[in-house]
Image (spheres, rainbow, N blue to C red):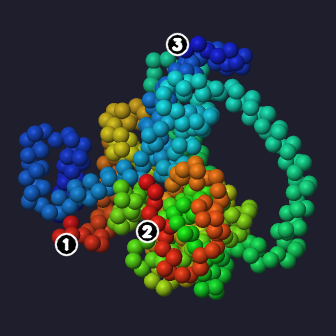
Amino acid sequence: MAERPKNMEAHGRAAHSALGEGEFAAHFQKSHRVLWLVAAGILGDPNLAEDVVQDAAMIALDKLENFTPGTSFTAWMAQIVRNVSMNTARKETRRRSAPLGPDSDAAFPDPNSNGKHIEKMTELGADGRLPANQTWFDDRVMRALAEVSDMARACLLLRTIDSMEYSEISAVLSIPEGTAMSHVHRTRRLLRERLGDLWRERPSVSGGNA
Amino acid sequence: MTAEQREQLNRWIEAYLDGRLTDEQSAQFAELLKRSPSVRAEIELQTEIDHSLRRLFSPPTAVKAPETSEVVEGSTKRAESVKGPRKLVSKRVWAFATAASLLILVGFGWQIWQAFYGDSADPAPHLKKLTLTEAYRAAEQEGFKAAWLCKDEREFATTFHWQLGQALAMAPPPKGIVAKGISYVRLDQANAFNVVQIITEVGGDGVIVFVDKRKSGGNACLKVEPGLRVFVKETEHLLLREVTPLDLPMVLDLLEEREIPDEWKKDPPGYSNSGAAPGSATPGDEAGAQPPAEPTP
């Protein structure tokens, strides 16, 4: 176990902590990817995820004594990330919806997005250009994602991006395994329903209807 | 297909996607995929959705350590940089220092601000705070002429680096989109005269992308008058708003943040090699209006 810095003892808050700051950092690094996905899922916004994870880490550092040895660090941190994410989402919704008036552009935000903004986070390809259909499709995916609950989004991202087992998702998000599976299945289905027509009618499909 | 059959098919699809089919079931499902174009299309669609999710939600590869925001590669260095208590102390010190500085500055700053920008004064037109619509209409009245053209990608990138602290790259526009150049504008949500307009023409229509620091605007205005639309793209540091009479954004996708070499950061834009000042190119000259060349790898 890493030696506890003296200043921590001076603050008297970590005297009973089972987790040193050095260990925290190591655990944090290992869990970062999952925590980032949890934040991105709850927020529905990858751009804010890193800030939220960092804020959650600062909160966790102040509450190291709350961590129970032998339990999952990732699950403990994920709970903090979820709380911070939900607070941030509420603030963002208020902040972003405030300036919108009745004459605001109808395409932004999407009427189905519950006030959440739709962003374009596509990356340039190797040739430095965006495939035309990629942006178009990604935008629709983001809009459809805004329709599902924050927990369902988080489950889907952990499953799709990190290929986590449902039992692992269950542990990280503190929900029953069946619920995690149900969230993923229903969200996938909803996305297919929302995007099916658009996908079939997408421009420049070679070979006719896909 | 009845609702029950549809439900059953969905269960098969989910089991297939989750890899939970037995060998025998997999063979059956493979047969179904061969026979049914609609099921095949559904699997293709799900695959495309998964690709899209991976593009949209790609976690960063380098991990930032808490507090320092320093990007570290190894856990050892990370452990050294995590110092919660120091942050608490330093936060208080900075809070007092900031408050004291503000008190001193407010007195002097307010008078200077009023002299140049205050509502009581009659500001020069170029210093007037504009809404997105007003800024667009003002550019329209001037025939969507830009203040200057960037002669190369370096000037384009460094313009944004100097003005907004983050360089920007523009991919070569496809046929039908003409990059006309760059101007500065003062929008009513921005605190300073630092919003950069990228003026383009798409099929004869003027399309302007307003580029601002991501957080400097606070509640970024998204309101435009009927007949115009605003599309938004947020990058890590920048907020880009495309104001257009068209139904779709045409320029936002061409713009991405980029890193620039240190030597580019030394000189203000336009003063790199030739010593020519910004604005030396002719605004509106389509031959020279081609975008700031290829984005640098």
Figure quadrant of the C terminus of chain B: bottom left
- Residue at horizontal 52%, vertical 21%? A23
Whether residue B66 can be seen here: yes
Q: CA distance from mark 1 to mark 2?
A: 30 Å
Q: Which residue is mark 1?
A: A208
Amino acid type at image mark 2: Pro
- Residue at horizontal 69%, vertical 25%? B85
Q: CA distance from mark 2 to mark 3?
A: 55 Å
Q: Nearer the viewer, residue B71 or B32?
A: B71
Q: CA distance from mark 1 to mark 3?
A: 62 Å
**Could you say whether the residue bearing mark 3 is in a helix, strand or loop?**
loop
At which x and y percent is residue B253?
45, 65
Amino acid type at image mark 1: Gly
Kindly report which numbered mark, 1 or 2, lies closer to the viewer in this rendering: 2
Residue located farthest toward the front when viewing the structure as drawn: B274
At which x and y percent is residue A132?
36, 67
Q: Which residue is mark 2?
A: B172
- Residue at horizontal 46%, vertical 42%? B60
In which chain is the residue bearing label 2?
Answer: B
Q: Nearer the viewer, residue B75 or B47?
A: B75
Q: Are marks 1 and 3 in contact (CB under 8 Å)?
A: no
Among the 4 quarters of the image, the one containing residue A100: bottom right
Q: Which residue is mark 3?
A: A1
Relative horizontal placement of residue A133, taking residue A10 as reference (left or right):
left
Relative horizontal placement of residue A24, taking residue B50 as reference (left or right):
right
